Image: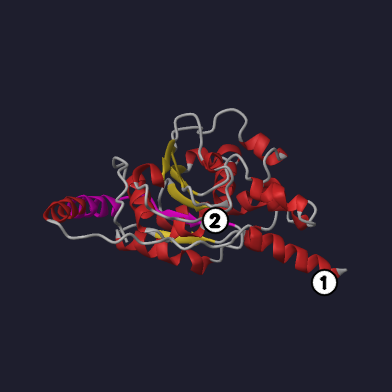
Amino acid sequence: MLLRTILAATTAAAALLVPATAAQASTHHTAAATASAATASTADTNQAIAAAGANPVIVVGGLIGISIAYEPIAARLRADGFRVSIYQLPNLGFGDIRESARALATYIDQVRANTGAAKVDLVTHSEGGLVSRWYVKFLGGVDKVDHYLSLGSPQQGTYAANILKFVGLGSCAGIVACQQMSIGSDLLTALNGGDDTPGSVRWTTVRTWQDELVWPIGNAALADGATNVLIQSWCPLRVVGHLGLVLDGTTYTVVRQALTDATIRPNCFAL
């Protein structure tokens, strides 16, 4: 019986974290492209300078999101001058999202104390976006967070969680966070009741057509004035999966622009 439970939980977790490969677009170096690249380089430099005085950035991982998986995006942020740390969800995010949010609150207070910063910026992936929203909305984070960015977070839930009920795994094989990410869950009903974007926090979401885990993809967006970016609306040929959102160069240009309050113009050719 114990073996069956372990196998079921592993299968459900794998179904929620199938990685995707972010295809990289190739370019031909025409004169026009060279001029465009020079302009982009200048903008990047200005953003890097602005980052030097920015809030500490906390990258909040998702379900089974071990810290090392977020080193690529953390390294990009550090290279642009941001002070960055990675927050791995307790128990790899299998537990109650509300408990994970309480643990995140403690971590954020530690970062603020260590850096002397009044506020932090949150760059979140998948379940980490829900954990962070719960913190902001219900645990006092509205006064401690400046920028909130979510990458492929099932803000309104995902049928990828619901569908597990139909493949012999019951209600997400007993994984609490999976149950809470199901469309119509009690947690999401509470989280999405009232204002999606409380306080003066600057809210940005990023989503992709190729997300294997957030169905429908519109569920990765927020209402009430949030900036919602669909990668393929800007870059139709860009292929980015769920995990690819934390690896993809184009997505990173959106993250950097949002953190520096720049106009959102994704670079479709960024590596």
Question: Residue tagged by mark 2?
Answer: 107
| Residue range (magenta) | 41-62
Name the amino acid, label 2: Tyr
> Marks 2 and 1: CB-CB under 8 Å?
no
Percent of width and height locating residue 176: 73, 52
Question: Which mark, by number, is residue 195?
Answer: none
Instruction: Identify the mark nearer the N-term, 2 or 1.
Output: 1
Above-or-below relation of 20 to 143: below
Structural crowding at the residue carrying mark 2, measured as other residues with C-alpha within 10 Å and reported as few (<14), some (14–19) or many (≥20): some
Hey, what amino acid is under mark 1?
Answer: Leu
User: Along the horizontal axis of the image, is 46 left or right of 151?
Assistant: left
The answer to whether residue 189 is magenta is: no
Instruction: Please provide percent x and percent y for residue 156.
Output: 60, 39
Position of residue 71 in the picture relative to residue 106 (left or right): left
CA neighbours of label 1 inside 10 A, class few (<14), some (14 to 19), many (20+): few
Q: Which residue is mark 1?
A: 3
Instruction: Report which quarter residue 146 is drawn in.
Output: top left
- Give the x, y percent position of residue 233: 38, 42
Residue 104 point in image, percent of width and height: 57, 53
Left/right placement of residue 6 relative to residue 136 reads right
Q: Secondary structure at mark 1?
A: helix
